[in-house]
Image (tube, rainbow, N blue to C red):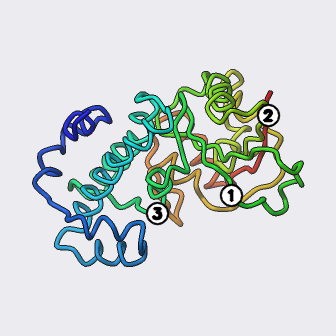
Amino acid sequence: MDFDSFIDGIGGGEYADAVLAYDVDEGELGLFFDDFEAFVSRGREADDPGMFFLSSFLRLAYSRHADYIRQGIPDDVFIATYSDISLWAEEYRRKTGRIGLDRIFWLQHHIRMELFRLGQLQFEIVRDLPQPPWPQFREGVRLLNVHIPKGSDLSLAEDSFSRALSFFREDRIVFLLHSWLASPQLQTLLDDGSRIKAFASLFTIVGEDDDRQAEERIFGCISDDPSAYTVTTTLSARAKRHLMDGGRILSGLGYLERP
């Protein structure tokens, strides 16, 4: 797999020429692992920070291919995992009208091989035991944070959980979710039969977080005046009405143990 094929494989064909034309030297790329803060500072000082980070992250991701091969991880997981770069590049273009990337702190986990996409969901390795309101999990059990990429088919979530058990070579995993999709308030706004509602019902909810993630995902932005939100779907119409009535939509914290 060459670099061009990689960019095309993750859905970045539209910006491939711009990335290839924007060179980042090996010393700058090396800062990512040697001194991440310096890497971030160098990018922010670049003539075009968005292009610096997009070009850098694509080159860093491609350099991981050898590590995937060495660990026996198939190319479909490699491509699926790093397709997240294209998703966030598209979000950057939606917000700015330019080609680039700014989700650098999130995407660093992909480069460090701490996060993998398996089917419809992403799974991030948990290094430290979570604190309350999370319960005290059994010592030695594998913990994985669950993330839901834009456009995921939540009806296939169980397939992703099964893939995670196989991928991480575990017979038991506790999956942790911190997401607006698990919001108790959101469930009251959804119809019975909703895929979001069915997905959230898999988890035992142990707490809430007022991070306004729901508003950002539903409306594409966060406003202190809910009347300013643009309605495009039935859910956004119900959410807007709920917020205008003084309600909130908090993110839910939940866990799921499999098998």
Callout 2 amino acid: Arg
Q: Nearer the viewer, residue 94 or 236?
A: 94
- Residue at figure coordinates x 87%, y 50% from the top left: 137
Query: Residue 33, percent across and down?
Result: 42, 66
Above or below, 36 relative to 123:
below
Q: Is residue 113 left or right of residue 100?
A: right
Q: Which residue is mark 1?
A: 127
Q: Quadrant of the N terminus?
A: top left
In space, the residues marked 3 and 2 are separated at their CA atoms by: 29 Å
Q: Which residue is mark 3?
A: 105
N-term mark: 2 or 1:
1
* Number of residues whose C-alpha sits closer than 10 Å to that of mark 1, classed few (under 14), some (14–19) or many (20 or more): few
Q: Nearer the viewer, mark 3 or mark 1?
A: 1
Q: Which residue is mark 2?
A: 172
In space, the residues marked 2 and 1 are separated at their CA atoms by: 17 Å
Query: Residue 200, percent across and down?
Result: 72, 35
Callout 1 amino acid: Arg
Query: Residue 199, percent across and down?
Result: 69, 31
Q: Is residue 56 left or right of residue 253?
A: left
- Residue farthest to the front? 70
SS at mark 3 in the image: helix
Callout 3 amino acid: Phe
C-beta proximity under 8 Å, tags 3 and 2? no
